[in-house]
Image (cartoon, rainbow, N blue to C red):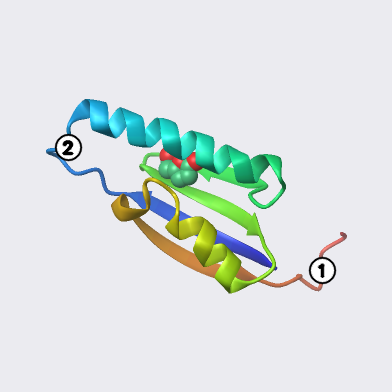
Amino acid sequence: MLFMVQMTVKKPHDIDPAVWADIIAREREYGQKFMKNGKFPHIWRVVGKFSNVSIFDVESTDELHQILSNFPLFPYMEMEVTALAKHPSALN
Ligand SMILES: O=C(O)C[C@H]1C=CC(=O)O1
């Protein structure tokens, strides 16, 4: 099942820079684990925003929720999830 997820980061203005840097480092490591195993094949930056558009390829909505809710940045992100279906004009 394919999902498009837009994640928008809401950085607390008063967060300790070292704490934030640690969260960002753990976020990268956690996300790249799913990029390597094929469950998170795309991530794109939304130009001009601290936001991304990502594609997840998972078995179920429960699996997607499990992955998303364990992102270290989860408490600091708004997420919009869109289920994707094959387009009839798609060549592959
Ligand atoms: O920088 C971001 O857009 C936040 C974030 C969410 C997943 C990831 O790898 O980074």
| Amino acid at circle 1 | Ser
Relative to 61, is 79 above or below?
A: above
Mark number for residue 89?
A: 1
Is residue 92 or residue 30 the one in the foreground?
Answer: 30
| Amino acid at circle 2 | Ile
Rendering quarter of residue 16: top left
Residue located at (36% from left, 42% from top): 50
Residue 72 visible (yes or no): yes
Q: Earlier in the sequence, mark 1 or mark 2?
A: 2
Rendering quarter of residue 36: top right
Q: Is residue 56 left or right of residue 85?
A: left
Residue located at (31% from left, 54% from top): 75
Residue corresponding to mark 2: 15
Is residue 34 or residue 79 the one in the foreground?
Answer: 34
Q: Quadrant of the N terminus?
A: bottom right
Total marks drawn? 2
Secondary structure beneath label 2: loop
Q: Is residue 84 left or right of residue 5?
A: right
Q: Quadrant of the C terminus?
A: bottom right
Secondary structure beneath label 1: loop
Residue 46 visible (yes or no): no
Are the residues tagged 1 and 2 within 8 Å (C-beta)? no
Is residue 34 or residue 55 the one in the foreground?
Answer: 34
Relative to 79, is 22 above or below?
A: above
| Rendering coords of residue 90 (x, y %) | 82, 64
Ligand 1 positioned in quadrant: top left
Q: Residue furthest right?
A: 91
| Rendering coords of residue 56 (x, y %) | 62, 57
